[in-house]
Every structure is written in C-alpha cells, then in structure tokens.
Image: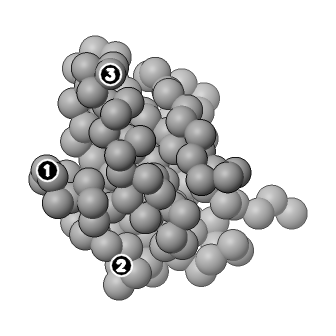
Amino acid sequence: MKVIQIPALQDNYIYLVICEKTGKTAVVDAPDAPLVRQNVKREGLELVAILNTHHHYDHIGANEDLLSKQKLDVYGGVYDRDRIPGITHTLKDNDEVAIGLMKLRVIEVPGHTLGHIVYYSEADGVLFCGDTVFV
C-alpha cells in the first residue's frame, strides 16, 4: 500500500490509497475533486473508488464532481446511505473492501456521527479514521 496525503480546505486532508501491485486507487474523504484528479493524473493512477468515513461535506464534497467524470464505486456506512452522494456499497462492522489486491476492514465507530466508519488495513497497519473521536 502506498498513501498520498493531499492538503485540502484549511485543515483537512484527502488520502489516495494505492495498491502498488495493480495501481488501482481509492480516494478517502475528498472535499475537492480537482485536487483529486490532478494528483491521480500526475501519479499515473487508476482511480476506482471513493471511501467515505461519514456524511459531512468536508468528507463527501467531491463525490458528485468525481462521479460526473467517471464511474466509481462509492463506499460508506449503512447509516449514511441516504446522506452520501452516489453511494453504491453500504458497509457495516467487519465488512471488507478490496482495492486491487489490498483489503480494508470496516469498523463502525459511532460518535462524531451515528454512521461513522473507519477503514483498517491489518497487513499495512494503517487506519483511515476520518473524524473519529477517541475517548
């Protein structure tokens, strides 16, 4: 797994999650579609999916724009299914998402929002936690 961190808005980040064996790429929590496209093009990647941790605009703001240019799988929590634009796959605790040969496990972490989820790669020891509040 390779991860590219892209600063967005004033205090957010977009993550490109890349399967190094296949080049297939997912974007995690993107508020800015032009930034995503610019980085995908510069790196020569194949964007195949959007992974949303929750429904707030600074995490889903790019969905509709990205989907207007290409077909993508859009993942989000089952409780956010009516609030995430373009959602194609609803996820619950312990579901798995495959991006190329990478596997990401879904963990439900309600708190910041009822439907908040995180994506965890056990193989790489990487967690995409959105706005999870740890107590």
Q: What residue is rendered at 50% in x and 39% in y? A: 15
Question: How far apart in space, not on screen, are marks 3 and 2 (Cα)?
Answer: 32 Å
Out of 55 and 31, give the one closest to the viewer.
31
Query: Which residue is found at the position 31% from the left and 39% from the top?
Result: 37
Give the residue number, with chain letter if any, for mark 2.
Answer: 81
Residue 5 left/right relative to 84: right
Q: Is residue 44 above or below residue 103?
A: above
Q: Quadrant of residue 112?
A: bottom right
When asked about the image quadrant of residue 40, the answer is top left
**For the residue labelled by badge 2, is the local secondary structure a helix, a strand or a loop?**
loop
State the residue lying farthest toward the top: 21
Q: Above or below — where is 80 with respect to 12? A: below
SS at circle 3:
helix
For the point 25% across and 37% down, the residue is 47
What residue is at 21 percent from the left and 30 percent from the top?
46
Q: N-terminal of the two: label 3 or label 1?
A: 3
Badge 3 amino acid: Arg
Residue under label 3, please give it: 42
Depth order, front residue of 90/61 = 61
Horizontal side of 61 relative to 108 (left or right) equals left
Residue at the disc numbered 1: 70
Q: Residue furthest right?
A: 135
Q: Residue furthest bottom?
A: 82
| Left/right of residue 64 with respect to residue 11 in the rendered view | left
Instruction: Report if the CB atoms under discs 3 and 1 are less than 8 Å apart.
Output: no
Can you tell which of label 1 and label 2 is closer to the viewer? 1
Tag 2: amino acid: Arg
